[in-house]
Image (cartoon, rainbow, N blue to C red):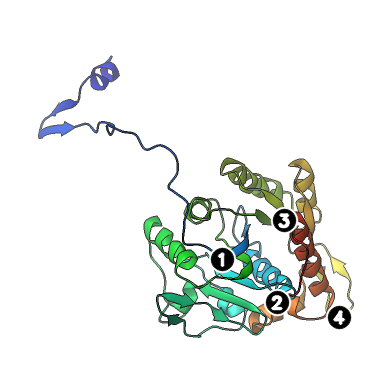
Amino acid sequence: MVKDKIASCNVISMPTGTIKMNTPPPTPVIGPPPKSTKYVGVKHTIMVMSGKGGVGKSTVSVNLAVALAKKFKVGLIDVDINGPDDPMLLGVSGKDVEVKGTQILPVKTPFGVDVISMGFMLPSDDTAIIWRGALRHKAIQQFLEEVQWEGYDYMVLDMPPGTGDEPLSISQLVPKVDGVVIVVTPQDVALLDARKAIDFCKKVEMKVLGIVENMSGFVCPHCGETTYIFKKGGGEEAAKKYNVPFLGRIPFSMEIVEGTDSGVPSASLNDTVSAIFTDIADKIVQSVDVAPSPK
């Protein structure tokens, strides 16, 4: 009865005055904001995302970009505004971003990948970015529209964990995302994490290119034996359950750890791990239906 009375009133009398209830706008907002008309010159845009943090998504993003750069002109946008790690992973921390005319120039790396990241804009590595969603959206928009991306074959977007502001901004701004690579870990909880990311892609109408199972077994640096610390097969099981491609397993090896710390991505080397990333990159290229061609 009380609820009915409140619902029928626009003004509620209170001991200290009145509260005016909000009324709907005369014309409701219909549909998402318009796509960007300034993000041009990139043939294919690939998102790398995860349902949670700590799965090695940035490591996969960087190495995927380096693997693609062996055949294509590749850019990398570090969309993780709060945790911009890509400059360190590519060995270009501390580099200055240059401006040419009205456009920002991406930072070149020794591995054929050009990158832009909030990490280049901070006064120090200790600086925390304390921004609400609107500011993060604006920064992403600038990375897409105000950086010189003309003539790139592939753009890899390293997303922050989860399905919040940043991936939503990408889905609204980029005219066409060719697909999403979802990174999971091998244990059973990968099913839950993958499900959320896949559901996000479905709701914003983006294709899932496949699932990568990261940290899939620890390779002993002494004997070479593989121990499955986090179990094995969660990523592949998730791919089967949700009917998406399984792109491959990446081991938890000292080579990847050392390469991450030293700024030398594993995909740039000539070893087993590099071959795995190259195979994943080739599957992605085939999935977006592009014949490999030299840069």
Amino acid marked by disc 4? His
Instruction: Name above or below for residue 37 compared with residue 68.
Output: above
Foreground: disc 3 or disc 4:
3
Which residue has dot 2 on it?
A: 257
Whole-number angstrom distance, CA of label 2 to CA of label 3? 30 Å
Helix, strand or loop under label 2: helix
Label 2 vs 3, first from the N-terminus: 2
Tell me the kind of residue under disc 3. Val
Instruction: Say which of marks 1 and 4 sits in front.
Output: 1
Category of crowding for the residue at label 1, using alpha-carbon neighbours closer than 10 angstroms: few (below 14), some (14–19), many (at least 20): few
Residue position marked by numbered label 4 in the rendering: 222
Category of crowding for the residue at label 3, using alpha-carbon neighbours closer than 10 angstroms: few (below 14), some (14–19), many (at least 20):
some
Q: Position of residue 11 (x, y in %)?
A: 16, 26
Label 3 element class? loop
- Point out which mark residue 288 bears: 3
**Considering only vertical position in the picture, is 21 above or below 33?**
above
> What numbered label is drawn on residue 213?
none
- The answer for how far apart the CA atoms under marks 1 and 4 are is 47 Å
- Which quarter of the rendering shows the C terminus? bottom right
